[in-house]
Image (spheres, rainbow, N blue to C red):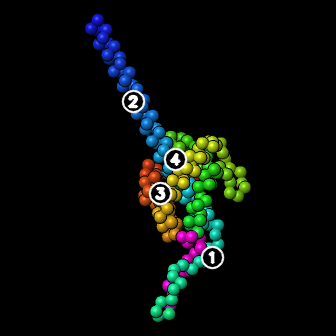
């Protein structure tokens, strides 16, 4: 009887260990999927913001500063490009997450991680959608992640787009916010 009890005890221990390992693997995959989603939303948001900024006439300027007259008779007004003005950036940020409906999910065969790519052409040209998974759950999750990022990092987004023009994806999504800390090797044009 004692030997049978010991075998049963070892079997239960083995089963408990297998269940624990399965839960741990599942948790890690869920965490990784969450990281992939946040990173993908940030990178897609940067792409959409950059595209929207590029659509504004670069010659259009806006006056900023104080319109009050100083004692010496001058004003502290300066002209900045409309495209990168705080007002324009705030307006773009209100709409940017709506464009997540134009993205699909794709499994990167090299890294085995989820990536997000635009599936709706901006210029009407056909796109290769063979690898992309088009799913309303994906787009709603991506939109929610985008909205959360825009809300949490509003100041950083304005700062980067008002002043930076090079490599904003890596600077904002990886270095400043750590949303893509696992993805520093993602090519800049992936999204």
The quadrant of the image that shows the N terminus is top left
Q: Secondary structure at mark 2?
A: helix
Sequence-wise first label, 2 or 1: 2
For marks 1 and 3, give the one nearer the viewer: 3
Sequence-wise first label, 2 or 4: 2
Quarter of the view holding residue 80:
bottom right
Q: Secondary structure at mark 4?
A: helix
Residue 3 pos. (x, y %): 28, 8
Crowding at label 3, few (<14), some or many (≥20) Cα neighbours within 10 Å? Answer: few
| Residue situated furthest top in the rendering | 1
Residues shaded magenta:
74-87
What count of labels does the image hold? Answer: 4
Q: Which residue is mark 4?
A: 37
Residue 48 pos. (x, y %): 59, 59
Q: Which residue is mark 3?
A: 152
Mark 1 vs mark 4, CA separation in Å:
35 Å
């Amino acid at each position: 009887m004692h030997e049978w009890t010991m075998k049963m005890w070892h079997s239960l221990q083995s089963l408990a260990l297998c269940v624990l390992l399965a839960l741990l693997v599942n948790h890690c995959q869920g965490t990784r999927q969450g990281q992939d989603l946040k990173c993908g939303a940030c990178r897609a948001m940067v792409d959409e913001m950059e595209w929207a900024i590029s659509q504004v006439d670069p010659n259009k300027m806006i006056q900023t500063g104080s319109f009050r007259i100083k004692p010496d008779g001058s004003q502290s007004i300066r002209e900045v490009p409309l495209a990168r003005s705080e007002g324009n950036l705030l307006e773009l940020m209100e709409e940017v997450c709506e464009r997540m409906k134009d993205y699909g999910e794709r499994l990167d065969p090299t890294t085995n991680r989820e990536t997000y790519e635009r599936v709706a052409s901006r210029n009407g040209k056909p796109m290769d959608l063979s690898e992309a998974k088009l799913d309303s759950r994906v787009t709603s999750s991506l939109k929610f992640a985008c909205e959360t990022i825009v809300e949490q990092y509003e100041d950083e987004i304005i700062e980067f787009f008002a002043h930076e023009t090079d490599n904003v994806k890596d600077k904002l999504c990886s270095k400043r916010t750590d949303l893509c800390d696992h993805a520093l090797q993602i090519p800049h044009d992936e999204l």
